[in-house]
Image (tube, rainbow, N blue to C red):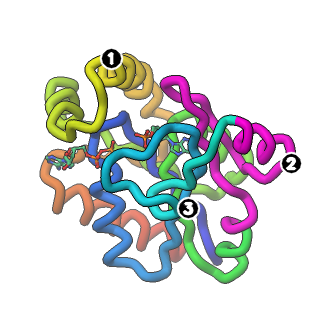
Amino acid sequence: MSKIFVISAPSGTGKGTVIAELLKRDENLYYSVSMTTRSPRAGEENGVSYHFVTRETFLEKLKNNEILEYTEYCDNFYGTPLDILEQKMNEGKNCLLEIDVVGAENIRKMRKDAVLLFIAPPSMEELERRLRKRGTETDEVIAKRLAAANSEMEKQSLFDYVVINGELEKAVNDIENIIKKEATK
Ligand code: ADP
Ligand code: 5GP
């Protein structure tokens, strides 16, 4: 039986980095490519990192029920396309959704058997260092993301698992083991 795995983490924690490693290790894991109205970062490819769309397109798809869940985060919309997810679930794939805590709460309401994982940074200081080191956002956007991070950290008790991304290899191993265990339940 296919399952939905949700990974949430404050921006800069390293969820993108962790997920890239997980996908290399598990061929039966489908990564749900979200739709977003934010601009692509350097190196982000349309259709791979995200489907980059205008606000008009996003709202149109929302109206047409083409989006399973969505959120508004730091002035942009982000949502999970429904069709492809259903298709992959029917093919028996486990699906990985990298979405925010609002999305995670909504998925829990819709799919009781979804497995919710929260990745936490080792500290808020390290989170800020990682966000700055990545160098993809302006100071203003970093400030907004850090403010959002504080409220996201307060929601971690809603999740089935909390994994700290201190040493990368350890975090990836921990999550890989959780997915293996839960996938066979
Ligand atoms: P997110 O997807 O959660 O916003 P990223 O995957 O983009 O975060 O990671 C943010 C930054 O932190 C990147 O520069 C990445 O290389 C770095 N990073 C990720 N995981 C670790 C780790 N375990 N230790 C140190 N740096 C990390
Ligand atoms: P970023 O701009 O850093 O790629 O993503 C910002 C936030 O939006 C992250 O917390 C990320 O998990 C979340 N996000 C990305 N796609 C989706 C989605 O489809 N739905 C929801 N609810 N959140 C998403």
Counting from the top left corner in percent of width and height, residue 145 is at 37, 25
Alpha-carbon span between mark 3 and mark 1: 29 Å
Q: Residue at x 34, y 44 (%)?
A: 119
The image shows residue 168 at horizontal and vertical percentages of: 17, 55
N-terminal-most mark, 1 or 2: 2
| Amino acid type for the residue under numbered disc 2 | Asn
Q: Name the residue under label 3.
A: 32
- The earlier-in-sequence mark between 2 and 3 is 3
Q: Which amino acid type is marked by label 3?
A: Ser
Determine whether the residue tagged by mark 1 lies in a helix, strand or loop.
Answer: helix
Q: Is residue 179 left or right of residue 158?
A: left
Q: Is mark 3 within 8 Å of ligand 2?
A: yes
The residue at 42%/22% (across/down) is: 148
Q: Mark 2 points at which residue?
A: 64
Per the rendered image, the range of residues in magenta is 56-85
Q: Mark 1 points at which residue?
A: 140
